[in-house]
Structure formats: C-alpha cells, structure tokens
Amino acid sequence: MEIQIEAIQIAESFNIKKFRAEFRAEIHSGSTTEAFYAIEDKQRYLYLFDYGVVVFANYDAVAKSEFMLFIKQYATNFVDLDLTEEYRIETDEKSHKITVKNNFTTLPAIDSSILRIVMLNIGQSVALEYYEVLTDELISSSKMYIQQLELSGKISISKTNLLKYIGKVLNIKNSIVDNLYILDDPNLVWDNEELNVLNRRLKTNFDINTRFKDLDYRLQIVENNLTLFTDVLNVRESSRLEWIIIILIAIEIIMALFSH
C-alpha cells in the first residue's frame, strides 16, 4: 500500500473555527488551531493548520483543486508563491522497522495516527519554507540599505518608508512567534513510543528544529539592522532640527537688527 501526501501553503492564515463549523465531513481530531479529517469511505485524509497550510493524503488533482477553491473563503492574505512539498508512505508487512527517508517513509502498517504525524511534519516543513522566503526578502532589502550606507555614508529612505519596513519585520516576527506551537509534539506521541520515534525521525529528516533556529537567527540579524537604520535616521532628524533652530535664531536676530 502507498499513500501520496502533499502539503501546500495557501494563505497566511485560516479561520479554523469557521471552517470546522461549515465543513460537512466529521472531524477526526483537532483544536482551535488545526483540524484533521479521516474520510475513510474514500480513503482520503486532510489536515488543516491555522498558519495557512493544507496537507492532502490520497487526493487526486481534481479533488485537491475543488477543495482549494472551497477553503479560500476561510483564508486571509493568499500566498502567491509555489510552496508545496510531496511525500509518500509505504507499507512493508514483512518489516517491523520504521524507515524514514528524504521523500518517503516505510512502515509495517498505516493508521490515522501515523498519517497524522507524517502530515503534521510535512505541514510544518512547508510553513517554515514560507517564513524562510519572507526572511530572505527582508535580509536582501536590508543588505541594499547597508550597501548604500557603505558607499555614500547615508541611507536614502524616508522616515515613513523606514517605519513601514520596521512594521513588516515586526509583523513577520510576531507571526512566527504566534506559531511557535508548530514545533510542539502532538499529545498522541506522548503515550505511544512508536509514534514518538516516527515523529522524532521525521523532525530530523525535515530539519524542523534546525531550520527554526536558523530562521530565528536571521530575523535577529534583520532586527539588528533595523536598530542601526533607526539610529541613522534619528541622527539625520536631529541634524535637521538643529539647522531649523539655527535658521530661526538667525531670522530672529535679523528682524531684531532691522527693528532697531
């Protein structure tokens, strides 16, 4: 038996509560931040996360397309990027081992709990890829301003645009912090050693923890650059105010001389 899995980053977030209330299929397990469905009559599995990721298992192209049209009404800020990840699960009844490889996992048998763990890790991997793309863009733009500072000794950015840039960085940072729970192990692995082993091996395979640490480090670099840009802007604003004060004093002196 083989099950094909695909995770897709569709939007920045989903309204899971509203989706669960209006989606016709009976939920297998979930919370306010995620929803897992086992549609057993069609041998399909579906996993939604509130950070905008959908994971399909055993969905053909038509079924995926139909669902993606449906889910858009519960999405906020669509992601215009091709962020997908494919994986598969294979069964080998003769083997009693769990084998985790780059693009597939081999198990003695498959059940909904195993599928949920595999789909969870693939969903986390795609979400991290999305945040990696965002931080790469921030680092590239901050590098441009640093080069300006190196070549000309100043930054050609207005106070308004700098504040917008700071807001963008903080928004991404807050979004990542809000979704820190994606690194948490699900409750079902705590009392099941087989699921715990599978979960740990998948996290290692997808470099989940390593990638998150790298993401946090790169965001820290961007924040340090922001501090530098803010200091430069404050110096520029202070210099401008000093010149304004000097001009006003000069005008006042001139007016006093003419009045005498």
Image (cartoon, rainbow, N blue to C red):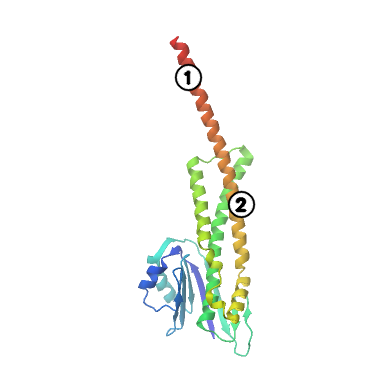
Q: Is residue 92 left or right of residue 163?
A: right
Residue 22 drawn at (x, y percent): 35, 72
Which residue of the protein is positioned furthest toward the top in this rendering? 260
Residue 72 drawn at (x, y percent): 40, 66
Which residue of the protein is positioned furthest toward the front in this rendering? 191
Q: Which residue sits at x=54%, y=57%?
A: 134
Of the numbered discs in the image, which one, if any, rests on residue 251? 1
Q: Specify the amino acid type for callout 1.
A: Ile
Q: Which residue sits at x=60%, y=48%?
A: 224
Of the numbered discs in the image, which one, if any, rests on residue 170? none
Q: Is residue 255 left or right of residue 223?
A: left
Q: CA distance from mark 2 to mark 1?
A: 45 Å
Q: Which residue sits at x=60%, y=55%?
A: 218
Q: Residues within 10 Å of mark 1 (few under 14, many from 20)?
A: few
The C terminus - image quarter: top left
Q: Specify the amino acid type for callout 2.
A: Ile
Give the residue pinned by disc 2.
Answer: 221
Q: Which residue sits at x=60%, y=53%?
A: 220
Residue 198 drawn at (x, y percent): 60, 78
Residue 167 vs 129, above or below: the answer is: above
Q: Nearer the viewer, residue 140 or 258?
A: 258
